[in-house]
């Protein structure tokens, strides 16, 4: 059968193409991809090409499909997996396969397995490690966004603390402690705020910094301080852009004791150094934002590492248990991953969106792979509706949902935009 996909041939060389995909083997599964959210990690892979650790050397002759935050429908199941998966079911996916120590994963490494496509062949290793999940939620976009949420959840779980005199790590953020999320009003930061407010292990104080007033205003609207207090969390937003000494100001919010958990959401040395400087006793700095610069470095206070037990760690993604937690919290309404989402587009918008991702404002960009649609900011639907009345209806639906993408909006879009 034929599929359409955006494929990577070399650094900054991605092409939307139609091609034949083979008949599945007995240990494979054929799926119809419906939604894929575009990740900054995909931009990094596209700009690096073969130099990326997950991308094969032969992509110039055997290109790979990009995109790894995707969901859709199961169409055909090979004999080996018929007792585990059924045709017609939705699926969710944890792309970090970690199969036999390999770095291979969808969106980077496979010719028929990636999110920016109409159809995929899921290889056996995805099922063998439990990365392909049956999914019964009402929407596709929530399953797509469960992957970035799983990265956030994994980071919270992987943070750790120690007890003086005991050689033992206590995993997870400090419950009832003081937390800071630096450069935290972007899409992943918003997901982290949502999780921090609604997970089982919550901080008592959560300080979120950024230098973009528009992003901070949106964060404040989505997470009012009064609502945070109902969750037992004092939530403070801080614009550090024009502060003479933002580090001192932020640390003073802890009454000078420093933070137990600091998450750094931008690969910028000054932000990393600020995170180190505001740590308290046994403080954990979690460097969340993956850099493209292999030589990125920042100054670290080794005096505090030695005497105050401060420590630094990082995580490249979540695991399948983290994805299951994201899906469970979403399905129960505890969290709403749509807070991360600001743009909608079709498969035809993937190339320009991916190549220009750092320069496009807003949060996550969600692609519906069986439609053509220029990437459009949700807040611009009314303006877009002057030429296409379907956008007016989408805007009405979203306005009834606090300005956020939702199940009803997705269902309307899938029903009223041409499906291939």
Image (cartoon, grey):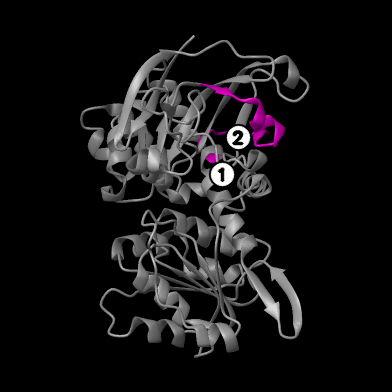
Q: Which residue occupies 53% across, 53% down? A: 316
Is 121 a magenta residue? yes
- Measured as percent of width and height from the top left, residue 215 is found at 34, 60
Mark 2 and mark 1 lie on one chain; the one further toward the N terminus is: 2
Identify the image quadrant of residue 78.
top right
* Residue under pointer 2: 92
Q: Which residues are magenta?
A: 120-142
Q: Which residue occupies 64% across, 76% down? A: 176
> Would residue 149 appear left or right of 118 to someone viewing this image?
right
- Measured as percent of width and height from the top left, residue 195 is found at 57, 59
- Distance of label 2 from label 1 (alpha carbons): 8 Å
| Residue 164 versus residue 12 in the image, above or below | below
- Measured as percent of width and height from the top left, residue 302 is found at 50, 83
Q: Which residue occupies 65% across, 70% down? A: 160
Does residue 119 show up? yes
* Nearest the eye: 302 or 284: 302
């Amino acid at each position: 059968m034929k599929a359409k996909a955006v494929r990577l041939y070399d650094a900054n060389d991605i092409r939307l193409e139609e091609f034949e995909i083979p008949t599945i083997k007995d240990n494979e599964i054929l799926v119809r991809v419906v939604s894929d959210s575009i990740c900054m990690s995909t931009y990094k892979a596209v700009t690096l090409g073969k130099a990326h650790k997950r991308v094969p050397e032969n992509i110039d002759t055997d290109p790979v499909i990009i995109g790894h935050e995707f969901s859709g429908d199961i169409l055909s199941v090979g004999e080996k997996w018929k007792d585990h998966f059924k045709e017609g079911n939705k699926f969710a996916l944890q792309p970090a396969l970690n199969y036999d120590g390999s770095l291979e994963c969808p969106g980077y490494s496979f010719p028929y397995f990636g999110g920016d496509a109409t159809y995929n062949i899921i290889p056996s290793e995805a099922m063998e490690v439990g990365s392909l999940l049956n999914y019964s939620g009402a929407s596709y976009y929530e399953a797509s966004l469960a992957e970035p949420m799983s990265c956030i959840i994994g980071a919270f779980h992987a943070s750790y603390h120690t007890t003086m005199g005991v050689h033992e790590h206590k995993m997870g953020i400090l419950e009832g402690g003081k937390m800071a999320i630096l450069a935290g009003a972007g899409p992943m930061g918003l997901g982290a705020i949502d999780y921090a407010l609604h997970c089982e292990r919550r901080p008592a104080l959560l300080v979120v910094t950024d230098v973009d007033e528009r992003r901070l205003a949106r964060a404040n609207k989505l997470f009012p301080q009064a609502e945070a207090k109902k969750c037992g969390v004092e939530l403070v937003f801080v614009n550090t852009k024009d502060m003479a000494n933002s580090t001192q100001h932020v640390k003073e919010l802890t009454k000078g004791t420093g933070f137990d958990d600091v998450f750094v959401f931008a690969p910028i040395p000054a932000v990393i150094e600020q995170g180190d400087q505001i740590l308290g006793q046994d403080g954990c700095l979690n460097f969340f934002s993956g850099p493209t610069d292999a030589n990125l470095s920042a100054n670290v206070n080794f005096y505090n590492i030695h005497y105050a037990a401060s420590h630094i760690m990082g995580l490249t993604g979540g695991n399948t248990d983290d994805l299951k937690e994201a899906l469970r919290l979403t399905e129960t309404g505890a969290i709403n991953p749509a807070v991360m989402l600001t743009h909608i587009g079709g498969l035809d918008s993937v190339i320009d969106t991916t190549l220009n991702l750092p320069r496009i404002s807003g949060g996550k960009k969600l692609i519906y792979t069986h439609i053509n649609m220029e990437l459009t900011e949700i807040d611009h639907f009314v303006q877009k509706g002057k030429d296409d009345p379907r956008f007016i209806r989408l805007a009405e639906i979203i306005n009834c949902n606090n300005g956020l993408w939702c199940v009803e909006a997705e269902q309307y879009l899938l029903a009223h935009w041409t499906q291939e």
